[in-house]
Amino acid sequence: MEKIEYDLEGTVFNIQRYSLHDGPGIRTIPFLKGCPLACKWCSNPESQKPQPEIMYQKSNCIHCGKCFEACRYGALSKENPYMVDRDRCVACGACAEVCPTNALVLKGKKMTVWEVIHELQKDENIYRRSDGGITLSGGESLSQPKFTRELLRACKERGWHTAIETTGMTTKEIIESVMPFVDLALTDIKIIDPSIHKKVTGVDNQIILENLIRISNLTKTIVRIPVIPNVNDNIEAIREIAEFTKLMKNINEIHLLPYHNFGENKYNLLGRIYPLHGVKELPKDKINLLKQEIEKFDIACQIGG
């Protein structure tokens, strides 16, 4: 087999350790930048754009002025309630480097496959003892296909269990290139109706649904449904998804992920408005009814995951 390209670079915005979700055991999750979808409920808006971004936490700012001296592009202004002019900012990170209180933080940096593996190796014994491993997330990690493939290959070479969270919005060629190195695919299905899907994510779902079948033919798969108020929080929408999963293979179970607004503050840090501001979480009894509907199809279902 060809040598792993350890010098290949990708854009990573976080590496989360000791996760008990997103796959079996205790896991480490590298989060990659870039996503072709713009889901209105996205809890990681800093993941959507492929390039690094500056986040501004106003409450941390002590108005020392060091950032204004560091910025060569005139992208910072006291008069701007969000501080950063996104049209001028090139995300060089100079302002974040001099900020003494982390009011300005650069989200996303270039890392080589080897640099990520070096971080993941710190918890190698934990993976083995807990039957855990590595889960690639984002964003959409398949939007960085070469980096994702080489990183997964390096993980498999070390005997680690690998998982990937994916929307399925990619190409057949990328799936066939990456999935041989994936032990578990965690695939999202938002809704079957294509017009609603486009309205709430920005893209049509025909390619997504085709690819989810393709992925399930290649590796063990769990379908996850983010249950969003006024989008798919009804019996009909959930039933349609359950019926669709019958076309897939290697389906282990379905996870219902109840809506939450934990990421709303991040939109403000990016100078953006949260699209679902004011939307309330769903009551537990309603989620339980949707779970019961899925179980009518003889599919194991859990809430959360």
Image (tube, grey):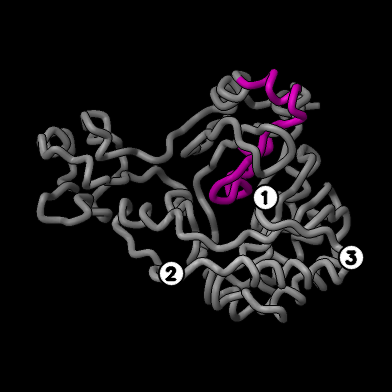
Where 233 falls versus 50 (above or below)?
below
> Where in the figure is residue 97, as x and y percent of width and height?
26, 29
> Where in the figure is residue 88, as x and y percent of width and height?
23, 51
Mark 3 Cα shell of 10 Å, populated few (<14), some (14-19), many (≥20) = few
Please give the name of the residue rendered at 38% of the width and 64% of the height, measured from the top-left corner: 274
Q: 67 or 147: nearer the eye?
A: 67
Q: 185 or 278: nearer the eye?
A: 278
Mark number, residue 298: 3
Q: 234 or 285: nearer the eye?
A: 285
Is residue 148 shown in magenta? yes
**Are dots 2 and 1 in contact, CB under 8 Å?**
no
Q: CA distance from mark 2 to mark 3?
A: 33 Å
Residue 184 visible to the viewer:
yes
Which quadrant of the rendered structure holds the N terminus?
A: top right
Q: Amino acid at mark 1?
A: Gly
Residue 146 visible to the viewer:
no
Mark 1 Cα shell of 10 Å, populated few (<14), some (14-19), many (≥20) = some
Query: Is residue 235 shown left or right of residue 45?
Result: right
Span of residues in magenta:
123-149
Q: Identify the mark nearer the N-term, 1 or 3.
A: 3
Q: CA distance from mark 2 to mark 1?
A: 22 Å
**Are dots 1 and 3 in contact, CB under 8 Å?**
no
Q: Identify the mark nearer the N-term, 2 or 1.
A: 2
Q: Badge 2 is on which residue?
A: 276
Determine the secondary structure under disc 1: loop
